[in-house]
Image (tube, helix red, strand yellow):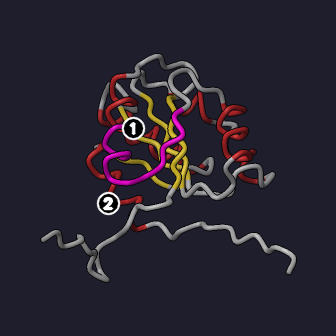
Amino acid sequence: MNIPATRSATEPSSENRVIILGVAESDAHVVANKLIEFELSLAGFTVINLGACTPIAEFVGAFQAHPYADAIVIGSLNGHAYEDLKSIGDAKKDLLISCPIIVGGNLGVTRDQAARTKDELLSIGVDYVLDDAAQLPFLLHQLPRRNIIIATPE
């Protein structure tokens, strides 16, 4: 006898949640990007993966194509996150992106540099800066859903 699996009311669901994923513009590191895509897909998220060396314009375009996306996740391993992402705040101010932006990776060579970069990223409009990719699924489950309901004529 097959008993269907059920979710408890308190267990978070990733079903129908869209995440836009990419790597900062000057960064060609893709291994972590592919692992994060795999992990999020296994967790039930739909992942739009823009890959490495992604300019802000591509993140904006992806969000415009998927305005119901729950978050944009950007990885940076080369220590240039602030330089690569400093115009993302303008995209948010101009309402070209309205979902949370999450950045993670190696933000600096030293702890002090990483801390400064984290503060700079938060000051330009990045909503969350993660130290560990393992924190990502938990954070995504905490974000409110951004489902868009489209009215259809009756």
Crowd tier of the residue under label 1, counting other residues whose Cα lies within 10 Å: few below 14, some 14–19, many 20 or above: many
**Which residue sits at x=47%, y=16%?**
28
Q: Is residue 13 left or right of residue 60?
A: left
Q: Is residue 70 left or right of residue 67?
A: left
Helix or strand or loop: what does disc 1 sit on?
A: helix
Q: Is residue 69 left or right of residue 103?
A: right
Residue at numbered disc 1: 37
Q: Single out the mark in the foreground, 2 or 1.
A: 1
* Coordinates of residue 57 in the picture (x, y in percent): 72, 32
Count the marks: how many? Answer: 2
Q: Quadrant of the N terminus?
A: bottom left
Three-letter amino acid code of the residue under disc 2: Phe
Establish if 82 lies above or below 17. above
User: Does 116 appear in magenta?
Assistant: no
Residue 84, by quadrant, is top right
**Magenta-colored span:** 37-49
- Which sits in the foreground, 85 or 15? 15
* Coordinates of residue 104 in the picture (x, y in percent): 40, 40
**Which residue sits at x=31%, y=43%?**
39
Mark 2 in CB contact with mark 1 (< 8 angstroms): no
**Which residue sits at x=70%, y=51%?**
97
Residue at numbered disc 2: 138
Three-letter amino acid code of the residue under disc 1: Glu
Crowd tier of the residue under label 2, counting other residues whose Cα lies within 10 Å: few below 14, some 14–19, many 20 or above: few
Q: Quadrant of the C terminus?
A: bottom right
